[in-house]
């Protein structure tokens, strides 16, 4: 597996993309993305579990129920959520316009929106934007598309990897946006993945869903699960490999590459959480079940007190223990060891006299690794989050204005 | 029911208290409180559900398993949590010293600690402090005791009410500390209640436990459930009323007064959350069950995005809807109405064009009421929280230093 320089959703063969400024954002920044496959592709998606599931997700779910898609259309600036029947009509219209502009089947559209909740989309601007984006589609358009889905993101999140599958080079590309309303308990992220792999529908679904749980569902920025979260993938077969089937060595290779993409993108989202200065990586080992390992790891990265302590370079391990304690899992507090990087700060549930200077050095890095050994079983999990800073408050105290 | 001016835990008859600076806090502020009843009292307590339950709570649980207590001893500055066997020994020693100094039965002690996790108590300072506090016990010592249990609290939280029970005036007093690591999902607060009511043990337990769920368990500051949370009550019978029994009109009067105490103290804790500038009161009506109403109300007050929006005076109702959506309850999104104070901002799950100036006026008040009508059932609940501010980050980024 090799990571490409400047990889994007147009790195795989047979994908064109565009990102343009349609005028939905008042800032004049890019706000409309199209990703187009030259042939219909196998498709899969996972959606937020928020009961207020945004209209575009509902339309996408209908559209790709037959397992195929050919175009992704995404706007940023307005989320088209909390808009009832009007929102559904607008999302359907957006989907129809994208199908019409690109000449694909009406149901081969993945449609997504991100931005402010509770405002209608400006439909004339949207229609014009879809036309302009279609005209701008190109094999070099991946980066512009990734820019066009950003909201409060400070970093454009995209990548691509290649793998050899039975002698054929297969490419997987991805783009994602963060960076608030992100919490792992229930759902997923806004991320779009493309691949030129030929892969059977069942194999794609299996590889996709397994990886989401260990990547996008293991990050948290602020504990809020958005109404608009979605991760979608299109596989268009243009690499020309023999279709990948479940249970084969080729499936394992593809799945491993996809996992690398999902985890890397998830880490990028966590690291660029609103106001974040650091990525926090929490690994829990020795849990009685996988579910327990995940719950504990997520409780630690979601804890406001752990997040502020990491921001303040404070080796306050008691807050880590506290978060594990209220995570709801079963374990023996007297068996717990805690490490900040390589520095052990607690043993058998009790604080150690540790090297504060060494811990400080680790806390000052851009990625802070935390390890909790429960010693109560055989399961482990890793979760990613970020520190909680003044800027998080600043960004979110005045988001709509 | 009448609220007393400058009421405290020594307002009820037969209670003495003291708060002194023993030297546990480097700041030189008060850090040791004693509350003493002139006779053994009926006692009840509820404890954190955090698995890392701090040592003092474990000792208290043992001590009051027989339903009586006569003295409360509390230190601030060091939490005596995450200290394993050493912590248990220290808490037992602290309990024994308090019993010895005040001449009560060894098991008639409620012991609590609050402050930094993972540090040992300075036992010589503690022993000396207990002696000094005993010497300082007085019927006017309630306020000093309330000061001595403060950590990052900016406001001293105490009160007392009187009620007429069968012609006898009964008094209930209380003190509490906040103001971080506070989350309602599992547990309770550090609060101490005294009353001179004569009340049967079963009636006291029933009145106490019912009220905790609707008050201290319905607040959140930061989503973190502390290892040291506890609410305890002592009823010493010194008012001379005929003992209150379950199921009588007198029980109802007592229970109502206790509820007023618990809700008022809970609101004080939420309003003085770390860095808070405003109290947020969220009421959810029309839920399918009481559990659903509570879950939804707590999700809204715990949402970082709602909390920052309130701080920023931003009527971003979509974040309120979003939090209800991920709270895990069953409801129909298309029936939901949302109000900020008296201003309706969403109807049937859809945003309204509302009076932004009127909403802004409400958001600028010291208490911001949010109402969510689910229209999916008959149950309702209220939860209390606070805004998320720069100062929360500041306080918690550098707590240990």
Image (tube, coloured by chain):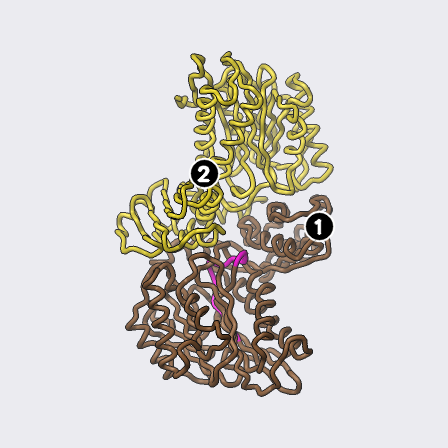
Chain colours: A yellow, B brown
Query: Depth check: B66 or B308 in front?
Result: B66
The secondary structure that most of the magenta stretch takes on is loop
Chain containing the residue with disc 2: A
Chain containing the residue with disc 1: B
Q: Residues within 10 Å of mark 1 (few under 14, many from 20)?
A: many
Q: Is residue A388 magenta?
A: no
B250 sits left or right of A288 in the view? right
Q: Position of residue A118 (x, y in %)?
A: 66, 42
Q: Could you tell me which quadrant the N terminus of chain A lies in?
A: top left
Residue at 36% of width from left, 80% of height from top?
B100
> Residue B205 is drawn in which quadrant?
bottom right
Check disc 1 and report the residue beneath it.
B337
Q: How many labels does the image show?
A: 2
Q: Residue A272 carries which label?
A: 2
> Are callouts 1 and 2 both on one chain?
no
Residue at 48% of width from left, 61% of height from top?
B48
Residue B159 showing in the rendered view: yes
Task: Tell me which segment is drawn in magenta.
Answer: B174-186
Query: Depth check: A369 or B141 in front?
Result: A369
**Contact between labelled residues 2 and 1, with CB atoms less than 8 Å apart:** no
Q: Position of residue B29 (x, y in %)?
A: 37, 71
Q: Does the magenta stretch include residue B181?
A: yes
Residue A282 showing in the rendered view: no
> Residue A95 is drawn in which quadrant?
top right
Image: A106 above or below A300: above
Q: What element carries label 1?
A: strand
Q: Where is residue B75 in the image (x, y as percent from the top left)?
A: 39, 70
Q: Could you tell me which quadrant the C terminus of chain A lies in?
A: top right
Q: Position of residue A192 (x, y in %)?
A: 54, 28
B245 sits left or right of A16 in the view? right
């Amino acid at each position: 597996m090799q990571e490409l320089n400047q990889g994007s959703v147009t790195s795989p063969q047979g994908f064109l993309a565009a990102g343009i400024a349609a005028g939905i954002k008042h800032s004049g920044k890019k706000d409309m993305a199209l990703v187009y496959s030259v042939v219909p592709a196998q498709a899969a998606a996972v959606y937020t579990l928020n009961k207020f599931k945004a209209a575009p997700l509902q339309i996408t779910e209908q559209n790709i129920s037959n397992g195929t898609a050919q175009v992704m259309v995404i706007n940023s600036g307005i989320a088209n959520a909390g808009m009832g029947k009007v929102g559904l009509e607008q999302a359907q219209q957006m989907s129809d316009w994208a199908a019409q502009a690109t000449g694909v089947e009406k149901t081969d559209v993945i449609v997504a929106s991100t931005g402010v909740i509770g405002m209608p989309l400006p439909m004339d601007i949207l229609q014009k934007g879809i036309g302009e984006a279609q005209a701008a589609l190109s094999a070099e358009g991946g980066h512009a598309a990734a820019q066009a889905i950003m909201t409060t993101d400070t970093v454009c999140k995209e990548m691509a990897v290649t793998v050899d599958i039975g002698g054929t080079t297969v490419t997987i590309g991805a783009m994602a946006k963060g960076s608030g309303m992100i919490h792992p308990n229930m759902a997923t992220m806004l991320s779009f993945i493309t691949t030129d792999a030929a892969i059977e529908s069942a194999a794609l679904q299996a590889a996709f869903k397994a990886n989401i749980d260990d990547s996008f569902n293991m990050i948290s920025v602020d504990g809020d699960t958005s109404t608009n979260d979605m991760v979608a993938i299109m596989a268009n077969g243009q690499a020309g490999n023999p279709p990948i089937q479940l249970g084969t060595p080729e499936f394992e290779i593809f799945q491993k590459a996809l996992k690398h993409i999902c985890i890397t993108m998830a880490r990028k989202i966590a690291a660029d959480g609103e106001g974040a200065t650091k990525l926090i990586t929490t690994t829990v080992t020795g849990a009685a079940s996988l579910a327990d390992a995940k719950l504990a790891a997520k409780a630690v990265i979601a804890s406001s007190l752990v997040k502020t302590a990491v921001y303040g370079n404070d080796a306050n391990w008691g807050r880590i223990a506290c978060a594990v304690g209220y995570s709801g899992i079963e374990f023996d507090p007297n068996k717990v060891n805690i490490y900040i990087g390589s520095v052990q700060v607690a043993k058998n549930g009790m604080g150690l006299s540790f090297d504060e200077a060494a811990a400080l050095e680790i806390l000052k890095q851009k990625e802070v690794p935390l390890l909790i050994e429960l010693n109560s079983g055989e399961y482990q999990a890793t979760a990613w989050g970020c520190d909680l800073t003044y800027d998080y408050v600043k960004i979110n105290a005045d988001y709509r204005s």
